[in-house]
Image (tube, grey):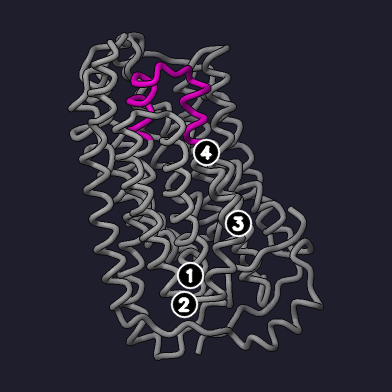
Amino acid sequence: MAGPISSGAAPVATHNPGTRYGPALALLASLFFMWGFITVINNTLLPHLRSVFELSYTQTTLIESVWFIAYFVASIPSAKLIERVGYQKSLVIGLLIMAAGALGMTVAASIPSYGVTLVMLFVIASGITLLQVAANPYVAVVGKPETASSRLNLVQAMNSAGTMLAPMFGAYLILGRSKAGTAQGEVVLTQAERLADAQSVILPYVLVAIVLVVLAFVIARFPLPAMGSATSRLAKEERKKHSLWSHRNLVFGIPAIFIYLIAEIGVANLFVNFVSQPTIANLTHEQAGNYLSLLWGGMMVGRFAGSAIMQKFDAGHVLAAFSVGAFIVMMVTVFTTGPVAMWSLILVGLFHSIMFPTIFTLGIKGLGPLTEEGSGLLVMAIAGGALVVVQGWMADHYGLQTSFLLTAACELYVLFYALWGSKTTQALPEPELH
């Protein structure tokens, strides 16, 4: 990156937080739920598209790479849009962009077209990026700085609720209604069967589009607190005196988000194919999709638990403990077979649960008037999920199970960040809320 980006003015409500933040955060939690739900529908879609378009693992994970490249490409335009039209209108626009992409997926299914599918997934992810750039830093600064990790973990638990329900939705409406999804093991489809399987995604994406439009209408009508700048003139003057790159927790936090996303998305994307193997659980893709819900359910439970734990224990220490647990279960996944390998991979969801929100809040800690730029850079780092294609390449050349060694290596960097990289240097006063 050439320089920092801004995610708009520091989010500050001009009304009494005690009376206005509760309903606003509850509504924002519904957004976290929805973008988690849609992101994981993508995970359910991957084995389906692999059969429909006869893709290699590399081509399959490229679909997810396109999804996360959108975070890198769309973050700067999202920040500029928020600054131009405001917080509330940007949320509405983001939801409508996602709805347009969902409807575009029905067109891609009707053709069917691998290229159009990639474009529409990019559109959906761009809408989610707009929501992420605004919502994550907002939740982090609304309240006491020392409980920011706890607060973001709590709201992110709703994101995990969406990710837990999405595989069941996808397994029933996509995999359960397709030839490849209900067959035992790998299956070669005829041209007619591929066309029928491709069209099985039309109904789910129509339903998703309807929900997104309704949610956009609710957000547009809801009296959200007016968002302003935390002493914006002072902030502009202060920015000239300080550098983002003098803050160790941000410098190492950006790659921590980037690397963590490689681990999370790699596990989610390859889970169905992994547990469907005869040497692991020998499940149909439909059955495996239901087990994927348990992985995301573990993330939801972990975030609720992590929110409570961080009220009493240092967030960095909790992150270190969870990263050690994640490394251990990934090694079990790589070096065992049968149900043990499957359940250890499911368990990694519990240990991954707190990583993103905790890294995010540790990364912006002590940035003061630089919080907005730092938040924008951390959101851009979500593009790390695009490098899941590296794990796809490893799966093609060295085996699917061996490819999870990459995930284990990612956990070690998170451990390094928790123990040393997250320590603040030259901490600045946090933005005040009015």
Q: Earlier in the sequence, mark 3 or mark 4?
A: 4
Quarter location, residue 176:
top left
**Who's the residue at 56% across and 38% down the image?**
386
Mark 4 nearby-residue class (10 Å; few <14, some 14–19, many ≥20): many
Q: Is residue 141 magenta?
A: no
Q: Closer to us: mark 3 or mark 1?
A: 3
Crowding at dot 1, Cα within 10 Å, few <14 / some 14-19 / many 20+, comes out as some
Instruction: Kindly identify which numbered label has been placed on residue 378.
Output: 3
User: Residue 150: x and y, percent?
Assistant: 44, 64
State the predominant SS element of the stretch in magenta: helix
Q: Is residue 124 above or below residue 202?
A: below
Between the residue at mark 2 and the residue at mark 4, the CA separation in whole angstroms equals 35 Å
Mark 4 or 1, nearer chain start = 4
Residues in magenta, as a range: 43-65
* Image height of 144 relative to 283, above or below: below
* x 68%, y 58%: residue: 249
Q: Amino acid at mark 2?
A: Gly
Q: Which residue is mark 2?
A: 143
The reply to whether residue 308 is in sight is: no
Q: Which residue is mark 1?
A: 147
Q: Nearer the viewer, residue 194 or 312?
A: 194
Where residue 433 appears, as percent x and y from the top left, is: 52, 85
- Residue at image mark 4: 66
